[in-house]
């Protein structure tokens, strides 16, 4: 889409902001002021963050959000057999809106998430997935082409996070960060990624800044924690400064030099921030459940993200996009055990993060939401589940209109209008319709939202109203 005159002017203004403030501008901060996690925050503080919690591999939504009314539960049990957990073990939830007699329950391990749901701090999007336009079961059976994300890990991941198939460069999170970056005195830290590379946080102006699950910044290969050694060389940092010439004539060389300096300078600043937050409450201390805590990388990533948020003033940000990966959701085998362990980890990681936001007084300033490549098939394969399409997602935070399910609970059955013959659930909401409320809460203008979601007009249905 070509930029209009006004859009081009806005783009240049925002680009100038990045050029005038570099990562090195934070090096002289008095970091002692950040040492306490209880950072005197108030809900009136002009800070907002969106945290994307990605369940990588395709989450089994039917082992996450169960049908609980007898008819639909029994239908699920008849299809999935022992892969469907006993109804008596499930955690039933109520809804603020009618579901036409249908009821739902959460996986037995989502205990703390249900507590947050019951307090009105968690909303559930029942069936949301990647679509180019609305579909009916009849249209799809008649041969209507499926969108690229259905059943493909790479395409599904890209469709969810960048609204285009694998190879997409810009993510909708990064484009939102572009739109509000003028609010940040240092745009370098507008987008933070604690997982593997994902286009979600990459904008046309804003680049993702990578941090590690061990609460350090990711820097160049071979460079130590503070950039002061290279395979044992204590002079590397000084040598690198002399090698990196910002006046190189070759444009490619100038870009490369700029990127290397950005990484080195940014790593020094970010690691100073983490050092100042070294007393931040730990994710794992002496918890008895090793699976939920000690072996839960996503929980440690959430701690790093919480530390970054605690340092928001020192980093010079009022709007932030943050990303976390939770691996292991491609459950083709041993689903009952494997997905059960994953649900323990999701519950522990999200509960820890919510507790830290409460402690900082930022529960209303930060909204966390889940994503996943796709949902799993209704039909089991051996002791696992195949790739599907739509699934359920969670949205968590003090600004969320929680305690409710948005979107229709499906009627379980291979011949149901909610499922394709292969067991894939057909979306009720598109990814764009879930993004809309998040972007508006984040403060993105209507004009910028239209550019970020150019396909939104294909869906006449109103967005789910899960944000206050």
Image: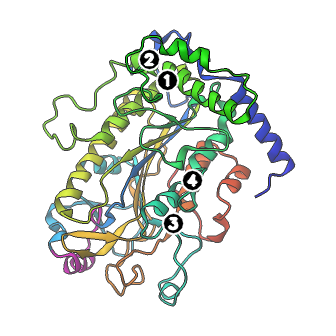
Earlier sequence position, callout 1 versus callout 2: 2
Q: Are marks 1 and 2 in contact (CB under 8 Å)?
A: yes
| Image color mode | rainbow
- Residue wearing tag 1: 267
Earlier sequence position, callout 3 versus callout 2: 3
Q: Is residue 251 magenta?
A: no
Query: How far apart are the two marked residues, 1 and 2, measured between alpha carbons?
Result: 7 Å
Residue 345 placement, left or right of 227:
left
Q: Kindly state the secondary structure of the residue where label 1 is placed.
A: helix
- Predominant SS along the magenta part: helix
Residue 398 image point, x, y percent: 45, 41
- Looking at the rendered image, the quarter that the N terminus falls into is bottom right
Q: Are marks 4 and 3 in contact (CB under 8 Å)?
A: no
Q: Is residue 74 magenta?
A: yes
**Camera-nearest label, 4 or 3:** 3
The residue depicted at 47 percent of the width and 62 percent of the height is 156
Residue furthest out toward the right: 5
Residue 163: quarter of image: bottom right
Q: Kindly state the secondary structure of the residue where label 2 is placed.
A: loop
Q: Are marks 3 and 1 in contact (CB under 8 Å)?
A: no
Q: Which residues are magenta?
A: 63-81
**Camera-nearest label, 3 or 2:** 2
Earlier sequence position, callout 2 versus callout 4: 2
- Residue wearing tag 2: 226
Mark 3 Cα shell of 10 Å, populated few (<14), some (14-19), many (≥20) = many
Earlier sequence position, callout 4 versus callout 3: 3
- Residue wearing tag 4: 437
Query: How far apart are the two marked residues, 3 and 2, measured between alpha carbons?
Result: 41 Å
Q: Above or below — where is 148 with respect to 90?
A: below
Query: How far apart are the two marked residues, 2 and 4, measured between alpha carbons?
Result: 40 Å
Quick check: can you spot residue 221?
A: yes
């Amino acid at each position: 889409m070509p930029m209009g005159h006004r859009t081009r002017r806005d783009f240049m203004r925002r680009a100038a902001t990045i050029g005038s403030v570099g990562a090195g501008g934070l090096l002289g901060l008095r970091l002692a002021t950040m040492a306490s996690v209880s950072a005197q925050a108030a809900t009136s503080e002009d800070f907002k963050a969106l945290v994307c919690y990605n369940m990588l591999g395709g989450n089994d939504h039917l082992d996450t959000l169960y049908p609980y009314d007898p008819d639909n539960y029994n239908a699920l049990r008849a299809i999935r057999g022992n892969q469907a957990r006993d109804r008596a073990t499930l955690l039933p939830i109520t809804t603020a809106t009618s579901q036409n007699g249908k009821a739902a329950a959460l996986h037995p391990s989502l205990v703390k998430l249900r507590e947050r749901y019951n307090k009105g701090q968690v909303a559930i999007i029942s069936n949301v997935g990647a679509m180019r336009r609305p579909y009916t079961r009849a249209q799809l059976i008649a041969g209507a082409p499926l969108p690229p994300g259905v059943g493909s890990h790479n395409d599904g991941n890209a469709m969810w996070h960048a609204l285009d198939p694998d190879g997409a460069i810009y993510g909708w999170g990064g484009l939102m960060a572009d739109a509000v970056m003028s609010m940040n005195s240092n745009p370098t830290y507008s987008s933070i990624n604690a997982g593997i590379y994902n286009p979600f946080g990459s904008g046309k102006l804003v680049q993702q800044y990578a941090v590690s699950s061990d609460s350090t910044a990711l820097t160049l290969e071979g460079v130590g924690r503070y950039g002061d050694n290279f395979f044992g060389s204590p002079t590397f940092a000084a040598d690198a400064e002399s090698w990196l010439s910002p006046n190189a004539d070759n444009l490619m060389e100038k870009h490369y030099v700029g990127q290397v300096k950005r990484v080195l300078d940014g790593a020094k600043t970010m690691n100073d921030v983490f050092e100042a937050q070294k007393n931040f409450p730990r994710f794992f201390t002496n918890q008895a459940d090793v699976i939920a805590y000690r072996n839960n990388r996503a929980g440690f990533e959430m701690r790093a993200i919480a530390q970054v948020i605690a340092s928001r003033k020192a980093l010079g940000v009022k709007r932030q996009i943050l990303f976390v990966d939770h691996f292991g959701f491609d459950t083709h085998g041993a689903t009952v055990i494997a997905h059960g362990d994953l649900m323990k980890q999701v519950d522990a990681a999200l509960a820890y993060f919510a507790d830290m936001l409460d402690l900082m007084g930022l529960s209303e300033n930060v909204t966390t939401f889940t994503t996943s490549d796709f949902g799993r098939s209704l039909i089991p394969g051996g002791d696992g589940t195949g790739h599907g399409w739509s699934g359920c997602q969670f949205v968590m935070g003090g600004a969320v209109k929680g305690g409710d399910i948005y979107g229709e609970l499906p009627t379980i059955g291979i011949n149901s209008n909610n499922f394709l013959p292969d067991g894939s659930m057909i979306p009720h909401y598109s990814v764009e319709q879930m993004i809309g409320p998040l972007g508006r809460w984040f403060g993105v203008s209507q004009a910028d939202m239209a550019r970020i979601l150019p396909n939104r007009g294909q869906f006449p249905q109103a967005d789910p109203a899960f944000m206050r």
